Amino acid sequence: MDTGNTKGKTKYGLDRFDLKMIAAAAMTVDHLAHFFLRFEDAPALYVLMRCFGRLTAPIMCFFIAEGFVHTSSRLRYGIRLALFAVISQIPYSYLNAGRFSLHEMSMITTLLLSFLALCAWEYIKPLYIRLPVILALLYLCSFCDWYFFAPVWVLTFYILHGSRMKQIAGYAITSCVMMGGWALYYVIRFNSWLNLVQLAVLLAVPLLLLYNGRRGPGGKAVNYFFYIYYPLHLLIIYLVKMYLI
């Protein structure tokens, strides 16, 4: 949440509205490739669309950390995430499993667990309790979209908050280690190079560096845009797949 205080901010660069529109567009393109296009049919286009789609998760993780810092009520913030996690699970599971399922949870659930990891980091003081709680939340994320990568990014953005350069450096390092390791595993185990596309999350680096700290047009409605758009676009894709193709 942007408090509306523009002190120290610049009108140049990308505001929150800009970045969330980019995230929504990237997510849509990524899902269109995933659900309607096969790599074998158009390799270059498929890879290009999936690379563009890698922008969404890091941008949303960045704003979870920003929101945790600036929101006037972390309780309401958490409740909002939980509400939309429940709503999003319906179209997400039908689109991916053909029925309601809790076998794999949506990205909003991943963001909710990331938020809880921030709460654990902030409010649980004994380290011997804090770390097991965070590790347990990371484990739960292994059953969600974007796995444990998302909460690691959120924690990185939050812990290094106050220095954009440190935030981005931390994000870049964790991304290279996690996504590079994941891609290497698929190369060694399955002789598949396609997962190298995951390294395209590094494309978010210049965009996050351009963030100017401003809310942009739309006011507080921007807070809800992604949460509403996410389940809505999943529902539309599901209906198209079921009834138009």
Image (cartoon, rainbow, N blue to C red):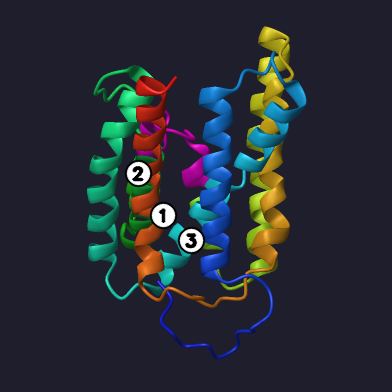
Q: Secondary structure at mark 1?
A: helix
Which tag is nearer the camera, tag 3 or tag 1? Answer: 1
Q: Is residue 169 visible?
A: no
Q: Which mark is residue 232?
A: 2
Q: Residues within 10 Å of mark 1 (few under 14, many from 20)?
A: some
Q: Which residue is at a point 57% across and 65% down the rendered structure image?
A: 18
Find residue 226 and name its label: 1
Q: CA distance from mark 2 to mark 3?
A: 20 Å
How far from the left and from the top, in percent, is residue 26?
58, 45
148 in magenta? yes
Front of the two marks 1 and 2: 2
Task: Give, as a three-letter code, the residue at label 3.
Answer: Phe
Residue 46 place in picture, x, y as percent? 68, 27
Boundaries of the magenta span: 136-152
User: Disc 3 versus disc 1: distance between alpha carbons?
Assistant: 11 Å
Most distant residue in the right direction:
44
Task: Say which of 245 and 148 sits in front.
Answer: 245
Q: Amino acid at mark 2?
A: Leu
Q: Quadrant of residue 3?
A: bottom left
Quadrant location of the C terminus in the rendered image: top left
What is the crowding at mark 2: few (fewer than 14 residues within 10 Å), some, or many (at least 20)? some
State the image coordinates of residue 203 (x, y, percent, origin top left): 71, 48
164 relative to 59, above or below:
below
> In the displayed structure, does residue 221 sit left or right of residue 33?
left
Asked if one can make out residue 140 in the rendered structure from this viewpoint, the answer is yes
